[in-house]
């Protein structure tokens, strides 16, 4: 995935989430992601993780999965897998 696609996703989705944190592989390398509210922070990593992974804590009680998938698909071609 592109770094721009990831940033666009996080920028649009972060107001729905209380917190987003993880490590993601992009076409520009590996990045540590840390989002709180509307603040999106990236840190380039020198070593690769075994898998890309984001942990999302929802801001609200109702399900956000439909919105998550819709926003992800808008900016990224890579399939989203939820665990």
Image (tube, rainbow, N blue to C red):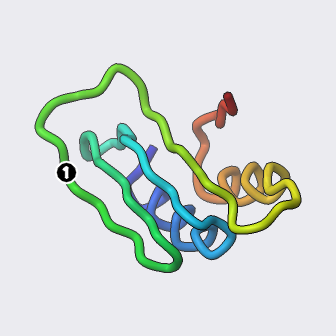
Count of numbered circles on the image:
1
The quadrant the N terminus occupies is top left
Find residue 6 and report its horizontal and vertical position in percent: 47, 56
Q: Which residue is rendered at x = 77% and y = 55% of the image?
A: 70
In the image, farthest residue toward the top: 50
Q: Which residue is rendered at x = 50% and y = 79% of the image?
A: 38
**Which is nearer the eye, 37 or 4?**
37
In the image, farthest residue toward the front: 61
The quadrant the C terminus occupies is top right
Q: Quadrant of residue 3?
A: bottom left
Q: Which residue is mark 1?
A: 44
Q: Which residue is rendered at x = 36% and y = 41% of the image?
A: 23
Dot 1 falls on a residue whose secondary structure is strand
79 displayed left or right of 60: left
Crowd rating for badge 1 (residues with CA inside 10 Å; few <14, some 14–19, many 20+): some
**Which is nearer the eye, 5 or 45?**
45
Instruction: Tell me: residue 37, above or below residue 48.
Output: below
8 displayed left or right of 4: right
74 displayed left or right of 30: right
Find residue 10 and report its horizontal and vertical position in percent: 52, 64
Find residue 43 and report its horizontal and vertical position in percent: 22, 56
In the image, farthest residue toward the bottom: 38
Q: Quadrant of residue 25?
A: top left
Q: Quadrant of residue 49?
A: top left
Q: Which residue is rendered at x = 44% and y = 65% of the image?
A: 35
């Amino acid at each position: 995935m592109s770094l721009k696609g990831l940033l666009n996703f996080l920028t649009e989705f972060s107001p729905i989430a209380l917190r987003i944190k993880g490590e993601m592989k992009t076409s520009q390398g590996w990045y540590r992601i840390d989002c709180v509210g509307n603040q999106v922070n990236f840190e380039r990593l020198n070593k690769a993780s075994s898998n890309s992974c984001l942990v999302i804590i929802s801001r609200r009680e109702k399900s956000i999965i439909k919105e998550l998938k819709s926003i992800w698909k808008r900016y990224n071609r890579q399939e989203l897998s939820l665990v």
